[in-house]
Image (tube, helix red, strand yellow):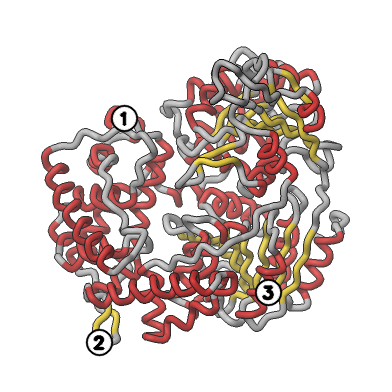
Amino acid sequence: MGGEFKLDRFQREAIRYARKNYSVIVSAPTGAGKTLVAEYIIEDCIKNNRGVVYTAPIKALSNQKYRDFSKKYPQKVGILTGDVGIEKDASILIMTTEIFRNDILLNPDGFKNREWVIFDEIHYLDDVERGTVWEEAIILLPKHMKMLALSATIYNIEEFAGWLRAIHNFPVKVIVEDKRPVPLHFFFQCNNQIYSSLKELKQANLLRKTERKKDSRRENVYINIKPNKIFTLINYLKEKDNLPCIYFSFSRRRCEELASEVYHYNFLQKEEKGKIVEIFGDLINKFNIQNDSHLNFLYSLITRGIAYHHAGLLPTLKEIIERLFTTGLIKLIFTTETFALGINMPARSTVFDTLSKFYGRYHSYLKTRDFYQMAGRAGRRGIDKEGYVFSRVNPKYIDMQSLERIIYGDYEPIISQLRSCYATILNLYKLMGERLFEIYPLSFHFYQANNFQKKEVLNLLKNKLFLLKHLGYITEGEITWKGDVASRVYSFELPVGELYERKFLEELSELNLFITVCALTYEPRKGERRPRLSKGVKRLKRELDQFSKEIHRVERTFSIYPLSKKFYFHLAEVAGAWFEGTEFYNLKKFSFIDEGEIVRYFRMAIQVLRELISSPAISIRLKSKIKNCLRKVNRDVVDAEKQLRQEF
């Protein structure tokens, strides 16, 4: 492999230290070639007959790595993501970080022959919702394993490395590469003009301040601001030969609307059109998704070299669009940010529809880190001299200072988001008993936090343990059967544990079992309309709402926040129809929820059912019910493993 290309300085250093048994943290811009370091480590492991784990933050990226590595290292790759399990004893095991964390706790001996773990996108440790998983996985890392951490954006990399050195015996080397292989040139569309630099935009003086005598409350007046038209931008991209382009929008609907607006453009020559139609048709037939509701519109766009891509599409259809994009025949794609996450899809240009987004709990300007994760897709190594990044700016919604901070500010530091869930506490208790609190001083949170924050987190951990004892998950220093069931089902421990104890799950029909688990996993989107429910489901909802209220009352008593997940029945009718054998493409009549979202939550429900069945506490009767349920629902486009086994 080494003879194929000339390695960059940072790649050579990282590989050299890895071969000297150092753990290595690599921070380098998107597209710089960090994955190459991982591949050298993988090849060394194969050569020395040692195993390696490759973790990724999302299932889509895990699936892509599985396909890529399977081509590169035939017969040597397996994958475990919760809804997929293929060749788990293979030399190279691809895992989501959650599953890696879970497996370390449940079966640490399973990693005896694995020498390395590769954490892709390690900055996810800072993610409010899921960052705790990365932190726990690093704390619990088996002593013999070394780690390679990859990220485009670690501002406080020395602090992170210092923490690793403090909690693990292995030596750690930090490798930083600031230089982009393809430099970025920033453009701005404002007042329906294209500006080739921030300086030029400032000189346009579009944020002029004047005093209004009639209305003293309004100080900022925007002079002659014209709306930014999409056609002005697309014409500029076309004229300047800045295609292909990845256009980022943070709304699924907006992606589709923008694609509609540029429908009249045609970016393909006759020969290219024939080629893309053939490839698209072959893939649609191979994956048997001819009835997908997006196909007619997408087909007409694709014949013009245009596409859109977001989480509402079927996973298979997303993969097909990604495959088309890599051919170079898609010249303009409208997509949400997940297209930028680790997936190797570079273009000549990237466009930001807006520079603010919803961050789970609040709406805010983009973090510099997130901006560059996406902007860094501009500029193809070995093809482009520059990458072009266009930001569409409306002075009413962003000030010059914020704009400058996003593009030229420092990356945000990684901040610990430690929030150990009940399952982690239960599994640690199995291993350590009352000594489990000895884990906290090993955390990044403890390393970073002030005394007040440390006390707060430790109190929360203690309160969770007190609650688990109070509710009978732990009795006389032992995990009970109820505790074992809860310890398998991360994120849904108390609802599942309480339902198990009261034999509620035992009494449910297979149909209502599936509806209940779907209700447990489902998280409604903002503004989503309430579903119509049948009498039977309404009765089920009333009972489960009462369960939730009781759980929340106890959690409040023990000062625990956030509260356990509630049940949401938005998928009840769809889940029922699917369980009864309805074809997937007929489900739309039962729901307004996007197809991709339906598949995602059905797969999550399947994962929960599999986690349940793994507990020895589950009765033969309930196991039989779960197996029958899985047979009925894990089929067709919902069957993640079937999709992954199919060859493109």
Who's the residue at 46% across and 26% down the image?
294
Q: Give the amino acid at mark 1.
A: Asn
Would residue 148 appear left or right of 60 to someone viewing this image? right
The reply to whether the C-beta atoms of the residues labelled 3 and 2 are less than 8 Å apart is no
Q: CA distance from mark 1 to mark 3?
A: 55 Å
Residue 328: where, in percent of width, then height?
Answer: 71, 32
Closer to the eye: label 1 or 2 = 2
Q: SS class of the residue under badge 1?
A: helix
Between residue 183 and residue 198, name the one nearer to us. 198
Give the CA separation, mark 1 to mark 2.
Answer: 52 Å
- x, y (%) of residue 323? 62, 37
Residue ID for mark 3: 162
Residue at point 86%, 37% (across, down): 385
Residue type beneath disc 2: Glu
Q: Position of residue 133 (x, y in %)?
A: 49, 64
Q: Position of residue 57 (x, y in %)?
A: 55, 55
Residue visible at 71% across and 61% down?
39
Q: Which residue is mark 2?
A: 476
Can you see residue 427?
yes
Vertical position of residue 541 compared to residue 435: above or below: above
Mark nearer the viewer, 1 or 3: 3
Q: Quadrant of the C terminus?
A: top right
> Label 2 crowding class (10 Å Cα cut-off): few <14, some 14-19, many 20+?
few
Residue 527 against residue 547 in the figure, above or below: above
Residue 386: assigned label: none
Q: Is residue 455 above or below residue 199?
A: below
Q: Amino acid at mark 3?
A: Gly
Could you say which disc has been placed on residue 586 in the image?
1
Q: Earlier in the sequence, mark 1 or mark 2?
A: 2
Residue nearer the viewer, 255 or 209: 209
Judge left or right: residue 478 versus residue 389. Answer: left
